[in-house]
Image (cartoon, helix red, strand yellow):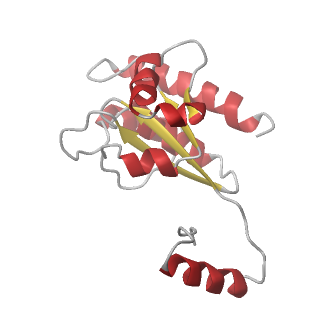
Amino acid sequence: ITAVSEEGLGITIMNRLKKTCAGNIKNLKNILFICTGNTCRSPMAEFILKSYNIDGLIVKSRGLYVCCMSKMAFSSEKILKDNGISFSDFSSCQVSKKDIENADEIYTMTKSQKDTLINSFPHLKEKIHTLKENEDIKDPYMQPIEVYQSAFDDIRIAIEKRFLNGY
């Protein structure tokens, strides 16, 4: 169960939860991936990281400019399947202030996306990063399948560097 804020009724709820688990509390880390429309890169990042089954991580993805909820791009789904990554039914989702505030670490696909978030949330800039250091992960939207595979490879390598090497 994810903790609730220990304010008002939340104090009582958290008291009961802590007593129920007899102090066996695990600190969870909320990871948020951001791209433009939440149909290509950030969902791939979400499901790639989830595939590693790292204990204690809650992983989500969102988009900066989601005009309507839509499915993951067909080519993103195909690339995930071709690379042995399972995924659930997915609908794109607009990032919210609450998403940003609740995330422990935020990874964007481009420096421009990072700058947009920092401009909107300057007090949270320490937790906002680009996934691939010093380089954008190119948007494969409406490109040939090879471009999706290249984006997948860039995302996978960046995730392995960030999350598998002593995380």
Residue occupying the point 42% across, 30% down: 117
Q: Considering the image in quadrants, where does the N terminus appear? A: bottom right
Considering only vertical position in the picture, is 145 above or below 83?
above
Q: Is residue 38 visible?
A: yes
Q: Specify the farthest residue to the left.
A: 68
| Nearer to me, 51 or 101 | 101
Q: Is residue 84 visible?
A: no
Considering only vertical position in the picture, is 53 above or below 72?
below
Q: What x and y, as percent, mark residue 41?
A: 42, 31
Q: What x and y, as percent, mark residue 64?
A: 32, 34
Q: What x and y, as percent, mark residue 23?
A: 78, 78
Query: In the figure, residue 22 lies in which quadrant?
Result: bottom right
Residue occupying the point 57% across, 84% down: 12
- In screen coordinates, is 91 left or right of 149? left
Q: What x and y, as percent, mark residue 16?
A: 63, 86
- In screen coordinates, is 102 left or right of 25? left
| Nearer to me, 164 or 56 | 56
Q: Considering the image in quadrants, where does the C terminus appear? A: top right
Query: In the figure, residue 138 lies in which quadrant?
Result: top left
Residue occupying the point 48% across, 31% down: 122
| Nearer to me, 160 or 60 | 60
Residue occupying the point 32% across, 18% down: 144
